[in-house]
Image: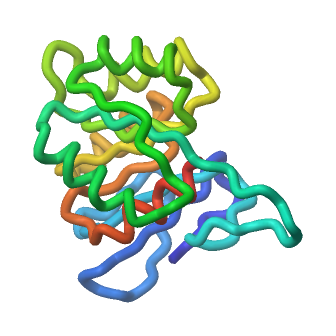
Amino acid sequence: FILLAGCELSIIIVERVMRTPRVFSESVFPQNVSCCIALRERGLNSMTATKKPGNQKKEIMKVLIVDDHPLVRDGIKTNVSAASEIEIIGEADNVEEARALARKLQPDVVIMDLKLPEVNGVEGIRQLLKDRPDTCVLVLSMYDDPHYVRESIRAGAKGYLLKQSAPTDLIQALQIVA
């Protein structure tokens, strides 16, 4: 895991292929990142979400899934159900449905695919955050092209995870962006 200090966003890069930490500037994304690019505002110290000590009540993270493939949505639900602190509160297969559900259900995090019918995911991120600026967006995509990563982050996404990532990476990424 690598953190870039001094940038507006810190970038954590997990490289499953090389397992060798490398530092990349904010404007350059590696071609061979095969797992996860997660972004977080300054101050993040590790990939694992930190819990405060004491007897605090555990808050449940409310998550909305936006993907046009029912099989993918079911896979996400199955994977995330292993984490007791995460609850899937809704699913949508397009941006308009996602916006309506986000206004109604007020999720903490939206998992957003980029290739969606009618309105693409990058524009969907912009629209969703216009409606609900406090919602965090985690992109879950098959595209490892740096262009998609940059455009997603510019649109307001807090993280970008590749669909070929390990199932545990999704839970970690949700904890990071929330």
Horizontally, residue 126 falls left or right of residue 163, namely right
Residue 60 in percent (x, y) is at 60, 49
Give the camera-side residue of 45 and 167: 167
Q: Is residue 121 above or below residue 99?
A: below
List x then y, in percent, for residue 123: 33, 20
- Rendered residue at 37%/31% (across/down): 90
Q: Identify the residue at the far right of this view.
A: 54
The foreground one among 124 and 168 is 168
Q: Is residue 140 left or right of residue 46?
A: left
The residue at 33%/27% (across/down) is 122
Residue 120's place in the image compared with 36, above or below, is above
Q: Which coloring applies here?
A: rainbow
- Up the image or down, 164 lies above or below 27; here it is below
What residue is shown at x 43% (from left), y 15% (from top)? 127
Image mark count: 0
Residue at the image point whose x is 44% and y is 78% from the top: 22
Left or right: 154 in relation to 164: right
Q: Is residue 125 above or below residue 65?
A: above
Residue 48's x, y, as percent? 59, 71
Q: Position of residue 15 (x, y in %)?
A: 34, 77
